[in-house]
Amino acid sequence: MKLARLGAPGQEVPVLLDESGTAFDLRSVVPDLTGEHLGPDSLERIQQAANDGALPVLEGAGELRTGSPLARAGSILCIGQNYAAHAAESGAEPPEMPILFFKAANTLTGPNDPVAIPRRAARTDWEVELGIVIGSRALYLDSPADARAHIAGFVTADDLSEREFQLVESGGQWSKGKCAPDFSPLGPWLVTADEVDPTNLFLRSWVNGEPRQDSTTADMIFDVDHIVWHLSQYLALDPGDVILTGTPEGVAVSGRFPYLSAGDVVEVEIEGLGRQRTVMGASV
Ligand code: ZN
C-alpha cells in the first residue's frame, strides 16, 4: 500500500493512494499516520477497508500539499557512511560497524516544503537516503531475518546536513550539523514493507536539475535487515521511529560540487518511493 498525508501543515488527511493516484480518505480507519497507527493490525484494517471498497475518495486531493507521510517521528536514527564510495569522498575508511547518530524529531517536514538554510551556515549539503519506518517494537532481535516484521514501510528521505556544524563545530559528534529546522524532508509516500524490496533500489539526487547522486541500495555496506537487527541490540526501536540508512557518493562535501545557496532546488528520488523537490530559502 502507498500511504500519504495531504493538506496544509497541521491539517493533513491520511490517505491511501491507488495505482491511478486516486486518494482514499483513511480517517474512518486511522486518525492519522503515526507510530500508533502503523502496526500490523492497523495496516491490516486499512487493507481490509480498501478491499471492501469502504474508503471514500478524498475530493480535490490533487490540489492539496503533500505533507510528511509520517505525522511525527519518535526517534530519527541515522547510519553514517554506509556506502563505501561516500565514505571515501568524505575522507574516511568504510566503517567496520554501523555508525549511529541522531536527528531531532522536529526536523521532519514535507517532501516539497521549502527549507531555510540555517543561520551562520557555510556548507549546506544534500543526502538522498532510504528511510525505514518502524511499525512494531524491535528489541534484541535474534537475527537480521527477524527485522522485516518490525518495519511498517519505506520512504524517500533527504538527510540535509550543514557540514561546518557537523565537522568543524561538532566537538566530535555529528548531530549539530543535522538538526536545523526542516532538515529531514520525508516522502512523498510511505510504501508498506510487503511491497518493497529494499535490497536493490535506485536512488538519485539533483541540484537545479543537474545530476548529483546516482546509486543503488545494493551498494550499502550494512543492509536494511542488518541495520534493524544491529540497532536493536542497543536500544528499543519503537513504532514511528525512522531510520535513515546512509547516503551514496555525490554530495558537496566531496569537493566536486558547490554547497547549497538560497534559491537552489534539491530533488531526491528513490525507485518506487517517489521524488521530493525542496527549494532552499535564505536563512532566518
Ligand atoms: Zn546521512
Image (cartoon, grey):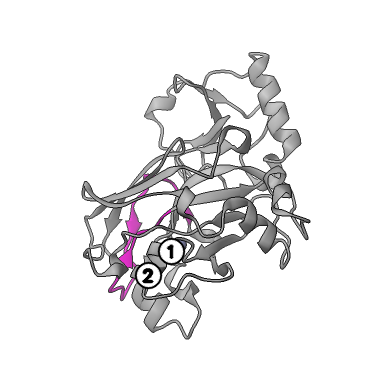
Residue 31: quadrant of the picture = top right
Callout 1 crowding tier (Cα within 10 Å): few <14, some 14–19, many ≥20: some
Badge 1 amino acid: Ala
Cβ at disc 1 under 8 Å from ligand 1 = no
Label 2: which secondary element: helix
Q: Quadrant of the N terminus?
A: top right
Where's residue 188, x and y in %? 45, 40
Where's residue 49, x and y in %? 68, 20
Q: Is residue 74 visible?
A: no
* Residue 152 drawn in magenta: no
51, 78: nearer the viewer: 78
User: Disc 2 vs disc 1: Cβ atoms closer than 8 Å?
Assistant: yes
Residue displayed at 52% across by 50% down: 131
Residue wearing tag 1: 84
Q: Quadrant of ligand 1?
A: bottom left
Residue displayed at 39% across by 64% down: 86
Residue wearing tag 2: 88
Where's residue 67, x and y in %? 46, 42
